[in-house]
């Protein structure tokens, strides 16, 4: 409990001065924030993991969530696992770039300051968030002076999503039904995105994403420089 209190205050300290920094637009053609979104269970997390394994210079934002950790998930690495009160406190302090309630079950949010810091340093920066979050980032981009590229990860088919969700085995049947209902609606959002990558093979999708990032950051895909 004490540890979580500290964590929230760390966010609070880290976010001081955000308003003044962002009264000046930070947009830079070589520092475009990449938002990776797509339907539930399409494999965003898996593609992201393959990308960062092959290209560790990419930084993926660590979200905060009120959902319980799953086996193997590490606080501060997979997510910042917060109580409802801690999450609400951060929201009140304007420490989030965006928040969403995902699958009507838990709050998720992107801490703003670490994103700004990485972009400022020219580090290729990615958010892996749901569709509501992607829309919220779009709404706030101008206010924050952010230049954003929206990438949609699509499944080869809806049947493929059903299989992936069942194989993942992290949800009970009721949760699976909810997630599939959300996914059906989310699939129609593809047209709102700048780039669409189909996740037929994880490594190929990750490489495609890498090439997109390289283009945005002026990096050579072969050398990473
Ligand atoms: P999971 O609970 O399976 O890790 O994630 C559920 C969904 O929440 C995924 O679609 C994931 O992309 C999304 N998500 C993770 N972090 C965030 C966040 O910070 N904001 C939003 N809007 N969605 C998130």
Image (cartoon, rainbow, N blue to C red):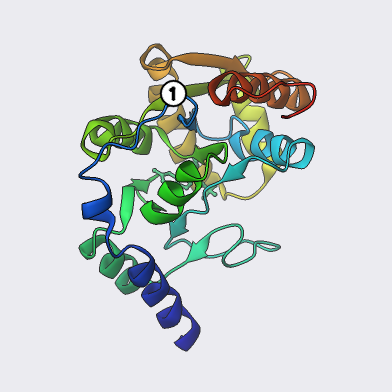
Residue at 24% across, 31% down: 142
Along the viewing direction, whichever of 157 and 151 lies nearer the viewer: 151
Q: Is residue 162 left or right of residue 113?
A: right
Observer-nearest of 220 and 1: 220
Q: Could you tell me if residue 107 is visible in this image?
A: no
Question: Residue 161 appears at what percent x and percent y?
Answer: 60, 26
> At which x and y percent is residue 73?
65, 61
**Can residue 121 be seen here?**
yes
Residue drawn at (67%, 29%), measured in percent from left and top? 163
Residue 172 on image: x %, y %: 57, 50
Res 160 → quadrant = top right
Please state the total of marks drawn on the protein image. Answer: 1
Q: In the displayed structure, does residue 74 sit left or right of residue 201?
A: left
Farthest residue toward the bottom?
Answer: 2
Q: Position of residue 95 (x, y in %)?
A: 31, 59
Q: Secondary structure at mark 1?
A: loop
Residue beneath disc 1: 29
Q: Quadrant of residue 213?
A: top right
Q: Is mark 1 within 8 Å of ligand 1?
A: no
Q: Is residue 184 above or below residue 139?
A: above
- Does residue 50 lie above or below 204 as drawn? below
Q: Considering only vertical position in the picture, is 21 above or below 87?
A: above
Judge the density around disc 1: few (<14), some (14-19), many (≥20) Cα neighbours within 10 Å: few
Q: Which quarter of the rendering shows the C terminus?
A: top right
| Position of 40 relative to 220 (above/below) | below
């Amino acid at each position: 409990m004490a540890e979580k209190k500290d964590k929230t205050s760390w966010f609070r300290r880290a976010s001081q001065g955000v308003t003044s920094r962002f009264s000046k637009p930070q947009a830079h053609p070589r520092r475009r924030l990449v938002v990776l979104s797509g339907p539930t269970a399409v494999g965003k997390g898996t593609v992201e993991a393959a990308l960062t394994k092959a290209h560790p210079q990419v930084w993926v934002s660590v979200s905060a969530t009120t959902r319980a950790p799953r086996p193997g998930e590490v606080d501060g690495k997979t997510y910042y696992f917060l109580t409802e009160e801690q999450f609400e406190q951060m929201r009140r302090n304007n420490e989030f770039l965006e928040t969403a309630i995902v699958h009507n079950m838990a709050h998720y949010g992107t801490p703003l300051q670490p994103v700004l810091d990485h972009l400022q340093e020219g580090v290729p920066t990615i958010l892996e968030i749901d569709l509501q979050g992607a829309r919220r980032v779009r709404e706030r981009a101008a206010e924050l002076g952010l230049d954003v590229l929206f990438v949609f990860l699509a499944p080869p088919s809806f049947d493929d999503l059903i299989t992936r969700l069942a194989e993942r085995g992290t949800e009970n049947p009721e949760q699976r039904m909810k997630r599939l209902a959300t996914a059906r609606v989310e699939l129609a959002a593809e047209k709102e995105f700048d780039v669409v990558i189909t996740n037929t093979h994880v490594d190929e999708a990750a490489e495609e994403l890498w090439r997109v990032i390289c283009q945005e950051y002026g990096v050579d895909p072969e050398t990473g420089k």
